[in-house]
Image: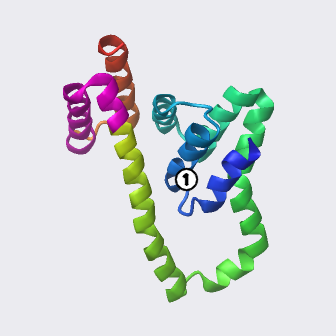
Amino acid sequence: MFMAFFIPGILGYGGGPASIPLVEKEVVDRYEWLTVNEFSEMLAMANALPGPIATKMAGYIGYMEGGILGSIVAVFATVAPSLILMIALMSLLYKYKDSPKVKRMTAYIRPTIAVLLGVMAYSFFSTSYEGAGLYQTVGIAVVSFVLLEKLRVPPALVIVGALVYGALFLS
């Protein structure tokens, strides 16, 4: 349990969204604790709740696999890399925070994170396409886009709406 969340915590440079594909790889592919569908549903619910996404995912998956102790271990493993680095390297980070090299390194990492998120989105789309069909998948995506971008509906309400639609019409 610890390693399943510690490794994405180390490699997920950029925070929770950057670690989502890494956590998915661990819990879906490597340990097979969740299916892709279960992971996408858990991710949707985690996005609807306030707080950091990585710790919510860790808490939920840890609880499902190991109860309260599993939840504690998973959440600690998620925050441990940042905690250790912040304690050990605080003065070094403060000294070089405005360095052009550090800013350039961050600029190089962002496209990698974008690709990882794109691969994950494609995986979710293909799973949805297989389960619900093309019209349902595209319809939900278009309606969600319009609600989020044009009408500025809060993401939590769009997620709940999609879940209700799925429960009523796709089950």
Residue 32 position within the rendered picture, expressed as x and y whole percent measured from the top left: 61, 34
Q: Quadrant of the N terminus?
A: top right
Q: Is residue 62 magenta?
A: no
Magenta stretch, main secondary structure, is helix
- The residue located at (42%, 52%) in the rendering is 117
Residue 41 position within the rendered picture, expressed as x and y whole percent measured from the top left: 47, 29
Q: Secondary structure at mark 1?
A: helix
- Side (left or right) of 101 relative to 33: left
- Side (left or right) of 107 relative to 1: left
Q: Is residue 87 above or below residue 15?
A: below
Q: As drawn, which residue projects farthest toward the bottom?
A: 100
* Residue type (three-letter) at the residue carrying disc 1: Ser
Q: Is residue 43 above or below residue 90?
A: above
How many labels, in total?
1
- The residue located at (45%, 61%) in the rendering is 113
Q: Which residues are magenta?
A: 126-150
Mark 1, Cα crowd under 10 Å, few <14 / some 14-19 / many 20+, is many
Q: Quadrant of the C terminus?
A: top left
Kindly indicate the quadrant of the structure image that contains residue 80: bottom right
The answer to which of 151 and 146 lies nearer the viewer is 146
Q: Is residue 51 visible?
A: no
Residue 128 position within the rendered picture, expressed as x and y whole percent measured from the top left: 34, 30
Residue annotated with mark 1: 19
Q: Is residue 152 visible?
A: yes
Q: Is residue 117 above or below residue 151?
A: below
